[in-house]
Image (cartoon, rainbow, N blue to C red):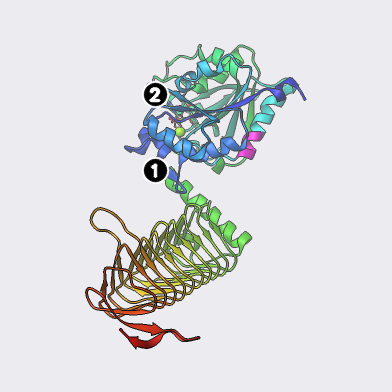
Amino acid sequence: MSEEQNKPLNVLILAAGLGTRMRSNLAKVLHKLDGRPLINHVCRTAMALAPEKIYVVVGHQAEDVKTAVLNELDESIVEFVIQEKQLGTGDAVNAARNHLQAQDSTLLILSGDVPMIRAETLAKLVQQHRDHRGKGAAATMLTVSLNDPTGYGRIVRDDHGIFKQIVEQKDCNEDQLAVKEINAGLYCFEAIKLFNALSRVGNDNAQGEFYLTDVPAVLSSEGEPVSIYKHGSRREIEGINNRAQLASLEKHLRRRTIKKLMLDYGVTFIDPKNTYVSADAKIGRDTVIHPNVTIEGTSTIGDGCEIRPGSRVADSDLGNGVTVLDNCLITNASVGNRCNIGPSAHLRPNARMEDGSRVGNFVEMKNSTLGRGSKANHLTYLGDATVGENSNIGAGTITCNYDGVNKHKTEIGNNVRIGSDTMLIAPIKVGDGVVTGAGTVANKDIPDNKLAVGSPARFIKTLVKEEGERGREGEKE
Ligand code: UD1
Ligand code: MG
């Protein structure tokens, strides 16, 4: 292996800019694509290259950008570099000078606003950089030819096709504007040479900024080898500078995800154009997704499920054979096999439905478990509650979990029949086999097999349960 191949590889991600063209109060790299900030896409890709370190240049809304980065990357691999004033991409790289100028290393520079680039492409860029003429290049740029190069820096070559310079759109003359080959904002540099050349870059240009894009021309004028890696995919290098570009990439990503789910995973989409699925979601074979359904985050949906129109599933896991009827919202919840949900049900964080359970219209669950085969079919709130197996929660039942200061638990046993409009004032335990009458207000524990009625609840009977029976009247109290 040559010396070049053994050099450490570091990544530097530029993410300090304001993103003026977004016309936003939020830093550009924090705008979301496929539900994740742009910077997170770039960080994940950088990580796939197994570099020594990933340096992230932050400035505008630095703390929020750091938080986003640390959601994606382990603290041990990242080093943040502060660019106090946003004086251009050259200045942004210069902010990392003290970390990198002395180390004989290869530096891959990525833009926080170029989120679609694939690790495989970057690996080829690094390889070409290291292989260049058997000795390695000082700089290698990734370029693409575009029918409409508007907004990008142009790659200007001499009559022999040899690289001369990158000229930013705003600094282009008419001939240069006509150039189709553009700078993708992704480069490989020899760190020591980069920082030497950067010292000679000025800001005498249309934007009064220090351009990183001037560095390759400086290097080449000093006789250093500069190489170009020309790439075929237009999509991969698309930079996001405004919201129209963001929407266009979002649409593209969504199409790609849904196509893959249809062709490789056997998922049916009734109307692919009007369905939204995150690239991190997993959906099983023969599941049918209706129009206007949104599947967000790292949700997993099993085989043979049906999700009806207007429902949203976020960061939740659904088992096999689950039916979600129209207009349900399911967030951070877990649903077992063969469950039925909705229409218009709301599963909030830490709602857990065990196999074969059902939740019907206008039922809300939060931090609660509904046991195997149990049902809450109409107009119910289950908060901080556990319900055992084969129990039925009648229409209008409320677990009154909040006393105005603290939240309390409700525990409901197996084979329970809660009558319509029952209020269970937590903390409370409802034993196995209990039946409550309609309109019961229970404010203390109900022992096993009691029939409770009234407000406050009185236990008027003990119900004797026989094999195969749901519970029947026994001795009077
Ligand atoms: C840049 C390139 C252009 C290329 C295009 C590809 C320059 C001068 N131009 O233009 O040749 O075609 O990317 O997408 O580099 N940033 C900082 N600090 C700053 C300025 C920017 O960290 O002071 C960061 C931004 O947050 C962004 C990245 O650098 O992530 C690129 O900046 P941006 O302003 O988007 O450059 P472009 O105009 O797109
Ligand atoms: Mg840009």
Rendered image quadrant of residue 109: top right
- Above or below, comparing residue 211 to residue 247 in the picture: above
Image quarter of the C terminus: bottom left
Q: In x, y percent, where is residue 294?
A: 44, 59
Q: Judge whether residue 121 is colored magenta.
A: yes
Q: In x, y percent, where is residue 379?
A: 31, 72
How far is the residue under mark 1 from the one under mark 2? 21 Å
Label 1, ligand 2: CB separation under 8 Å: no
Label 2, ligand 1: CB separation under 8 Å: yes
- Which of the two residues, 189 or 357, is positioned nearer the viewer here? 357
The image quadrant in which ligand 2 is located: top left
Q: In x, y percent, where is residue 173?
A: 46, 25
- Which of the two residues, 252 or 370, is positioned nearer the viewer here? 370
Label 1 vs label 2, nearer the camera = 2
**Label 1: which residue?**
243
- Mark 1, Cα crowd under 10 Å, few <14 / some 14-19 / many 20+, is some
> Residue at position x 47%, y 48% from top?
34
Residue 126 visible from this viewpoint: yes
- Which of the two residues, 81 or 259, is positioned nearer the viewer here? 81
69 sits left or right of 425 in the view: right
Q: Secondary structure at mark 2?
A: loop
**Label 2: which residue?**
86
Q: Which residues are magenta?
A: 119-123
> Residue at position x 36%, y 73% from top?
447
In the rendered structure, which amino acid carries the disc numbered 2?
A: Gln
